[in-house]
Image: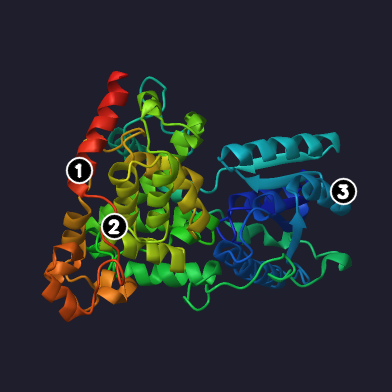
Amino acid sequence: MDKALDSALVWFRRDLRAHDHAALYHALKAARRVWCAFVFDATILDPLPRADRRVEFIRDSLESLDAQLRELGRRHGRPETGLIVVHGRPTEWIPRLAVDLHVQAVYASHDYEPQARERDARVRGLLADLGVVLHTVKDIVVFEAEEVLSAAGTAYGVFGAYRKAWLKQLAPADLQPWPVERHAQALAPLPAHWRRPLPTLQDLGFEPTNLRALKVPTGTEGGHQLLDDFLERIDRYHETRDYPALKGPSYLSVHLRFGTVSIREVARLAWERAAAGSRGAEAWLGELVWRDFFHQVLHHHPHVVAHSWRPEYEHVRWERGRHADRLFEAWCTGRTGYPIVDAAMAQLNQTGYMHNRLRMITASFLVKDLGIDWRRGERYFAGKLNDYDLAANNGGWQWAASTGCDAQPYFRIFNPVTQSRRFDPQGRFIRRYLPQLARLPDALLHAPWQASPVELEAAGVVLGRDYPEPVVSHEDARQRALRRYAAARTGR
């Protein structure tokens, strides 16, 4: 079959796998020779701390991707295939690789974040100056922002209506894998000067983290290991997902973030299981719909990156000054005096992961109990989460802060003690991350300040020494939050 192009380059970004890969499929189908590359983007990496689990996750996952490409080439009689990995600015490296490899086109997956769209626009222009075309295709979502619209042709602002339309529109073809293997004979051997080992963390200027000690599985193999494990539990997901001490979640969020597993694959499995009557699979499919929903919100309303989706809440008078900074520091370090909040922040700081129910509790506590601007919390999560994704992180924070579309009403304020007793009733999660409280009985563990001096002494706890007193009274903070939001709504 005649092909339109002699050679092409696939630029991997948030799609670190060789199977069911839209850009790779289109490049292999269109060109006689195809190379693959990944750029460690210095504009993203330079501001990061020198020990960052995400960088290590990506680096380990690239080893898996390189191995997949080599094996794919070997099976089709194409030795010496693999992945070109460089470190620098994509605006410099992608045009440079295009010239070095003499390609006519570069293929990549759509990236929806505003900075990524600006980057891609610059790369597209630079490549055009060289006579090279940049093709980008849908890969990281099931439906893009313009694909699920209201009858009036506008973006949805209410999740329930979006979910109904999303599910109504979904068809088997939307979840079919891209048959990369069918065209893999177009993979080209790496030029001799690119046959080099992948850069180490040290080469990139980074240090090892505790990622391996935490036994976080990386790469496509790691993602499928987690997927296989979750499929044995998915039917109970709706019953277990809210309890941080239980093995309820899929733990696939970081793999979906970096594309080591395909969103089409996991959505297809959930859809099929839900159609067979699994309430757990139906609930998890709903979470995947939320993922698409937040991406379409970011696309249609890019101002949410720095501003509230609801303009009236731009006028909320958040706490400022040294006292606010001390409260924020207590929240960041897990020293608020509310065990469920502090245990959750310890989990985040120690592992880079936080259970979804706890994300809601900690975000609500920062914004509504402490009166801190949601943007400060969002930035902190952005720096810590292994699975950090701008659309989901921003959407989650604006939901908790009542400033986003289809967010919880401002007058719904989580009581951290009630949430703790409901979702960690035996205190198993709290005891894991706050061992200094382990000897407190279950009834007192969620609110240690309610214990008598005798009960505290029996548990070996001195408040203010072993564990802090509460930084705020929830009831008082709740009233302040109601007044704060009411004032913003009325313009007073």
The residue that label 3 is drawn on is 99
Measured as percent of width and height from the top left, residue 3 is found at 76, 47
The residue that label 1 is drawn on is 476
Q: Nearer the viewer, residue 87 or 162?
A: 87
Label 3–label 2 contact, CB within 8 A: no
Looking at the rendered structure, the number of numbered marks drawn on it comes to: 3
The residue that label 2 is drawn on is 281
State whether residue 277 appears in this view.
no
Q: Nearer the viewer, residue 428 or 323?
A: 323
Q: Is residue 256 above or below residue 425?
A: above
Under tag 2, what secondary structure? Answer: helix
Quarter of the image holding residue 182? Answer: bottom right
Q: Nearer the viewer, residue 340 or 463?
A: 463
* Left-right relation of 224 to 114: left
Q: Quadrant of the C terminus?
A: top left
Label 1–label 3 contact, CB within 8 A: no
Residue at figure coordinates x 84%, y 34% from the top left: 129
Q: Earlier in the sequence, mark 2 or mark 1?
A: 2
Type of the residue with mark 3:
Val
Residues packed near mark 3 inside 10 Å, few (<14), some (14 to 19) or many (20 plus)? some
